[in-house]
Amino acid sequence: MKMQHLRRRMAAVAVLALAATTMIGVTSASAAPLTNTTWTVSNNQAGATAVTYTFELTTATAGIIGSVTATVPSGTAGTVGAGTYYGLGAGTATFSGTTLTYTVTNPANVAAGVALYIEFTGLTNTTTAGSYTSTVTTKDDNATTPVAIDTADSPSVSIAGTSTVVTVQIPKSLTFTNDTPSFTLLMDPSLTALSDLTKAVTVTVKTNAGTRYTLAAKNLGLKSGSNTITFASTGVATSVADASFAANTFGVSAALTVTGGSLAAVQGAGLSVANTFVGYTTAGETLVTATKPTGNTADSLVLTNRVKIDYNTAAGTYTDSITYTATPTY
């Protein structure tokens, strides 16, 4: 009889133990989110130092709280410390990765509906401005792997940038003018006054090219059928003095009469010499190079075209085309 009674008592204890285990499982499964969860910062400027992060929350589930964690934005730094706290016992603050942890020194049971207040001091805000939320979690006192009791996300906190990015867009601009789209020289080898003629062409350049600009010219050559009037020289490197300008040739001299702030200069060992003439080339050569923007005053280049003939020049209408090209480098 005693043995049967003992067996019945052990069976009853086993049932009670099972029932107790079942009740614990139900309590854990019914945990609710934290309420009234907020996160505030003492200084919301991006990169601000010595900032205090404050977290307020209300427990939803009764239990022994061993720690409270809160996530912060990537880039947050600093040597964290524990500030003022309410609702929990004294503890220590740590910071790892993007998670702040307040660990209670002597964990104790905390009822549901208790308002908690925790400050983390000594933080440096992320340098990336934006709107951020924090995930706040209460955990039990398991020394190995603390288990979450309740959790919730806070409303967003704005981390404000401390600088204003200013962008001013200035379009690339170049204005080119040519005061002589065409000209005609009526020449006669029998008259000295009509056998050696010149025509000045003024071209201007105004640009905001920050690095440089170049002005080049190319010439197809004066031709009348199979007859040609040759160039005075082979290009800007070689010049012909005014008095030595030969008949049956076509040449040009160049002079910068007005310059802005571009530091423009005539190019070529021949072309840059005063009172001399050079020949154009069919491939084209640079006449002027500038190293800065012109400013509001355009660079003005006077090109004096010269044709000289005699009775060795075959009669006819000679035509030509001079092409100018201004090339800016922004």
Image (cartoon, rainbow, N blue to C red):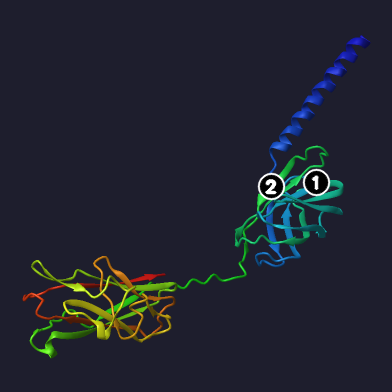
Residue, x 68% and y 58% (percent of image)?
Answer: 38
Along the horizontal axis of the image, is 75 left or right of 4? left
- Image location (x, y in percent) of residue 271: 33, 78
Q: Could you tell me the amino acid type at mark 2?
A: Thr
- The residues tagged by marks 1 and 2 sit, at their Cα atoms, a distance apart of 12 Å
- Image location (x, y in percent) of residue 277: 28, 80
- Image location (x, y in percent) of residue 24: 76, 33
* Residue 28 vertical position relative to residue 281 in the rendered view, above or below: above
Residue, x 79% and y 29% (percent of image)?
Answer: 20
Which corner quadrant of the image does residue 282 belong to?
bottom left
Q: Could you tell me the amino acid type at mark 1?
A: Ile
Which of 295 and 253 lies nearest the eye of the viewer? 253
Q: Which mark is residue 296?
A: none
Q: Quadrant of the C terminus?
A: bottom left
Q: Quadrant of the N terminus?
A: top right
Which of 204 and 280 lies nearest the eye of the viewer? 280
SS for dot 2 = strand
Along the horizontal axis of the image, is 57 left or right of 2? left
* Residue 245 vertical position relative to residue 112 in the rendered view, above or below: below
SS for dot 1 = strand
Q: Is residue 17 visible?
A: yes
Q: Which residue is mark 1?
A: 65
Which corner quadrant of the image does residue 31 belong to?
top right
Q: Which mark is residue 151?
A: 2
Q: Residue furthest left?
A: 315
Q: Please rate how many residues cluster around mark 1, counting C-alpha atoms within 10 Å: few if below 14, some from 14 to 19, many from 20.
A: many
Whichever of labels 1 and 2 marks the residue nearer the N terminus, that label is 1
Which of 77 and 291 lies nearest the eye of the viewer? 291
